[in-house]
Structures are given as structure tokens and as C-alpha cells.
Amino acid sequence: MHPELLVRKRIWLMLLVLAGLFLLVIGRLAMLTIRDAEALTQRGVAQWTKAGTVTARRGAILDRHGCTLTVSATAYTVTADPRLVTDIPAFLDAVTTVLPLDRDAAAKKLSDNTKGSVILKRQVDRATVDRLRTLRTESPKEACLHALAFDEDVCRWYPRGALLCQVLGLTTVDSAGQSGLESRYDDVLSGREGSYLRQVDARNRVLPGTEGWYIPAQAGSNLVLTIDADIQVIVEKAMRECLEVNSAESVICIVSDVRTGAILALCIKPDYDPNEPPRSDVAALTELMRITAVSDVYEPGSTFKILTSAAALDSGVTTPEDRFYCSARVTVDGDTIRCWGRAHGAESMAEGLQNSCNPVFVELALRMGTDTFYRYLNAFGLGKRTGIDLPGESAGILIGSRYVKRVDLARIGFGQSVAVTPIQLVMACNAAVNGGKLMKPYIVSEIQDEMGQTIQRFRPTVVATPVRPETSEILRGLLEAVVSEGGGKNAYIDGFRIGGKTGTAQVYKEGKIVSNVHIGSFYGFAPADDPLISVLVIVNEAHVPIDYGGTTAAPFARQIFEEVLPLLGIEKYAENQKDVLVPDVKGLTISQARRKLTEMDLNMLDDGIGSVVLDQLPPPGAALKEGGHVMVYTASSETLTPEELVCVPDLIGASDVDCARMLRQRGLLLSMVGTGLCVRQTPAAGEFVAPGTSILVTFE
């Protein structure tokens, strides 16, 4: 071949090779700048920036007086840079002397050199982090502790330990609601997370003078509960003793405001410390977290006789003087129903309630019949959820009226063949004694922002009116006699008027009745003539020789009443203290009015404005104990037109005259204890009560 032709071929071959290489470069550039551009950009940004989340501070949970029950505390997330840890075993040996870690899991994280930071542990307290910082400066370089970093985090802290633990609930390590109120109001408490972005070098150190951003987190709102921490402490103490003394499987206690449905205390034992929950045992923790007072159903037994009595009296099928005969057993449709003890013989309806006589209540249920009895049961809220603002509520079990037999109806009359939740029973019994109003139970009274300003307030809600006020008044008297003379004597307190009813219910396991254990209970309310609070104590499977409700539950209800009633300003009555009719002092001068009231052994307070009495509280003719206070007004005031329920004003710190004026403007009455400035009031500020309600104010 000619040399010149050979050279040309070689030149063309070189051109083709170069062109191919050029096309390959162009293709690769196109892939990097077009196809992989977004991924490469993100990878580059990740290498020279550090992004993170600013955890929002979760809202606090407070009791009705502002006492903190749950709050978010500062904690830290401990991280490490795997690229700086050259000796993983030495690093872990040094760190685990201060911070407990799962070595295998930590070693796996530290082996991943593609990441600039890995989390070793979250929600570490400040004391531990300070010790790690000291260890980092004092340890030799071979330990690689310079790879440690600390980011601020938050954790949930329960300053009162196990107090109200099931109701308050738990959060996960990510501050998400897991149970209780923490779960039910998670969207309210959680707030809104923030974020940040920083520019860092190859060693994950922030570059000074570089740009970034920081979006602060928005704190969550606070919950103000109807719970009274002082009452809760009393209840917790009593239930601890109840659990131990009775060797019971579990105990439940609910204390409620009879008039509004507000829950003042709720205790379930056994419990746990939410600051150190047993997260390693998921099954045990799940069981301990359950709010069994709203989720579990049981046959109420004789406490249900309160509802049967109310329905029978209201429907007119009986009266307290109505006569019955108990032969210790009664037959209905071929089934024999026995009384709990020996035959009671001839007795009135009132005595039947005191004796907790089953045949009497079988007769009352059958007299009413299915339609009438079920109308009352439905009005009392049985067979449906109460609507309490707690998760996991059950509806209870009530046989459908179309399917109920006469024998079923007879058994329902004394608390069998029907299942209720404790909260259902409390609300139904409250309705029977509070004048006939079935209230919706609630445990959150307000939602506040982080500055303490009210965002939303929850008001008492009347769900139904199952019985008339006259019936309720009669029943209160009958139930007071049950405590003073009948089966509830173990709840009697000298000097206090308490009404109530004991109950002993069957226990079912695997669908069969267990004969050697029972559920003992007691429902009580006080004062019996004008109920303020109610207490339900349930003792599940007490392992004692006598496990009736009168012996296992009633004594501890008595203990609670004995401590709580004085706390609410309810003083013991004196047997020798006389009732005095308040005289009419309107139109008299201040000195004349004072003299007239003194002659009647009554004290007088005046507003200090004028010299002639224009109005007075209590009104003329009202009954007042000797030594009581009468407030006289010498200046006219505009009376506000009350709605169905009136908001109680905040009286704390106000003088007796100012308290009287504020209550009078709202159509409320004043009941005074002591003199000086207001230090306690019942009901609390912000609660809604009926016009004409007496507000008990303690002065010091």
C-alpha cells in the first residue's frame, strides 16, 4: 500500500476513535447534568449542610387549680459522627460508662461511614450529657469521643409520678401521644415542629459566617383538667390501702361533681410510674395503661338498685311505704332467684332498699314492665357511651328490649344480666340524686395557649332528664337511710350526711361464674340533702374471707369522704346547733339591722356604702344555723340576667363584700366560712352552675 494512503487511513482511524471518545464524554456529561443532576445536587448539599428538626415543646397538663401534672422538660439527643470513630470498641467502652447503650445496635450504626451523624440515644437528661461532655474533654484521643455531639430535645416529665397515670397517658420518644389524654388531645398538645439548616465542613463542624435558616417550633397548647390534685392524692392513698388490705386484683375509684359531671379524681390500681414506664414489657405496659374505668364492663350488682328505685318511684309503681314480703327466694318463669342472705320477711320498699333485698327489686322491675323500665334505662344512658373525653370508652351491655325475657328483666332489676362501665354507673346514679339531670362526664375544662390565655372552654352538658326532681329528693332520703341504718353503715361518718348503696357482683371467667370471688363496690354522695360530690369505689376480686361491697369498698369510700368534704369547705353539723329563721331587716338602718340579727344569734356583714338596708342574703324566712352570716346591701346593683347555667367568677383574694357583690350580680348565693380574704371557693372559678346555687367561700 502506498505510504500516503496508509497515513490517511491512520488519520481517519484516529479521528473516529477521538470522535467516539468525545461522544462518550458528551454522553457522560449529559447524564451528570440532566439525568443525575437532582440526585447529585442533593448529595452535595447533604455533604456540606446539616439539616435538622426543632422539636416543638409539648403543652402542659394542669389540674383545676393550675397545679402541673405533666410538662415537657429539656432533654438531649446524643449523636456521633461515624467518620471520626476509628476504634468502635474503644469508643463504646468509654461512652457506656456514662450512657447505657445497646452495643450491637450502636456498633452497627457507627460502622456506616456514609453518614455524617447517627443517633446513639434520645431523651438523655442534662446531668448525663454534662458527664459526657466532661468525659469527652478528659478521655484520650484513641477513645474518639470528639465524635460525640449533643442536640437539644424534649421529654415528657410527670412531677407527681404515678398520680393519675392512666388518665394522663404516655408519649413515644418522638413526643407523639401514645395513650390517655396525651393520645386523645395529641393534636392540641403537640404544637408544630420547626427546622434548621447549617453549612458544615467535612468534619461536620459549622462554618462561621455562612448562611442557613432557623424556623422556631410552635409550642403546643395546655390542658386544664377538672381533676383536683389534692382530692386525687387523697384518693390515691385510699386506693393503695384498699388494694393491699383486700389483696385485690385491682381497684377503681371515681370522684365526680354530682351537679356538672366534672371528674374530680380518677384512680386505677395497680399503676406505673410514667417517668420510667416498663417499655421492655409491651404486654404489661399495655395492660397498665388501660383506663379500665371507661373501657371495662361489669355486672354492677346491688348498686344498680339505685336506678331501679328511681325508675319505680318516678313511674308511680311504688312508694317508700309500699309493703313487700321476702321469703329469701322468688320464682320467675321457672327460674329461682335468691336473695343474698336470709329471708327479710315483711318490709317496706324503703326497708327493702336498706336490706338490699333482691325479691323487692325483682317485683319492682316486673311491675314496671319492659317498655317502662327500658325507657328509664335508656334515659339513664345505659347501653351507650357517655361521651367522656378519654380514649377507649365502651358502651356497656344492655339486652335489646325486643329480646329481653321476664326473667332477664327481673335480674336487671337487682343488677344482673346487665353490664356497665364504672363511668356509666357514676353518671346514672348522679342523675338519680342530683335532681334528675344526666350529665355528660368531662375531664378537660379548658384549652389554653402557652401564655395561659383560654382558647376553648368546655361547659357542663345535660344529656337527659330521666326522673323528676321530686323523685330525686325522695331517693336521696332513702339512700341516706341506707348509710345510716342499712347495709352501707361502713361509709357512715358522724356529723356528715352521706347517702349511698353497696354492691356485690359476680365475676365471669371464660363465660362461667366464679363462685369464690366477687366485685365489691360502693356508690356514695354527700351532702345527702344537697349533693356536691359522689364517690364510686370498685374492688375487683378481693381475696378476703368476706368480700361484700360493704366490707371491701365502703370503708375506703368513708375514708375519702372524711378527708375530701372538709377540703371542699363542708363542715360537720353540730347536733345541738339550732336552725334560725332569718328576720326581715330591709328598710332598717345598719345599726338597727345589726341589733335585730344579733338578737337572733346571727352575724351581719354590710357593703359599707349606705346607711339603710335595701336588700339581704339569705332572704327573710330562710333557715340558717346559729352563728351564720347575713349579708345586707345598702346600694342597689344591676342583676345580670342569668342563662340556664351561670359561670362562677374568680373570688380568690377578694374581700367578703366584693365576693357577695360579684355573686349577687350573677344570681348566685354566698355561703361563708371565716372572715378576711377569699382563699378557697367551691365550685371553682370558671365552672357553670344553675342560677341560685350557693357558692361556698372560705375566708382567712
Image: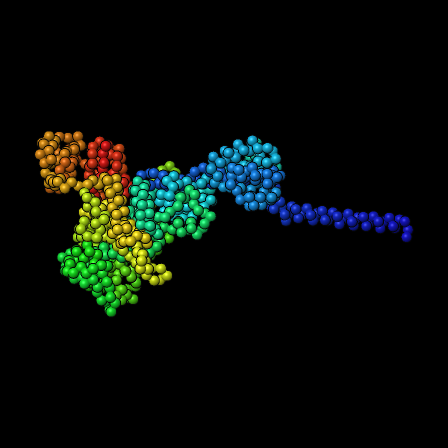
Task: Answer left or right for 109 relative to 190.
Answer: right
Residue at image position (27%, 67%) is 405
Q: Is residue 12 left or right of residue 495?
A: right
x then y, percent, for residue 581: 10, 40
Q: Residue at x 78, y 49 (%)?
A: 17
Q: Quadrant of residue 614?
A: top left
Frontmost residue, 1 versus 303? 303
Q: Relative to the observer, which residue lies in front, 80 or 592?
A: 80
Residue drawn 37% across and 53% down?
Answer: 392
Q: Is residue 83 left or right of residue 610?
A: right
Q: Quadrant of residue 109?
A: top right
Q: Position of residue 350 (x, y in %)?
A: 17, 55
Most foreground residue, 558 or 582: 558
Does residue 532 lie above or below 376 as drawn?
Answer: above
**Please, is residue 372 above or below residue 253 in the view?**
below
| Residue 343 showing in the rendered view | yes
Q: Is residue 428 above or below residue 120?
A: below
Q: Is residue 647 at all visible to an observer of this figure?
A: no
346 or 378, which is in the foreground?
346
**Residue 200 picture location, percent across and down:** 58, 36
The structure residue drawn at horizontal position 41% and vertical position 46%, both measured from the top left corner, is: 170
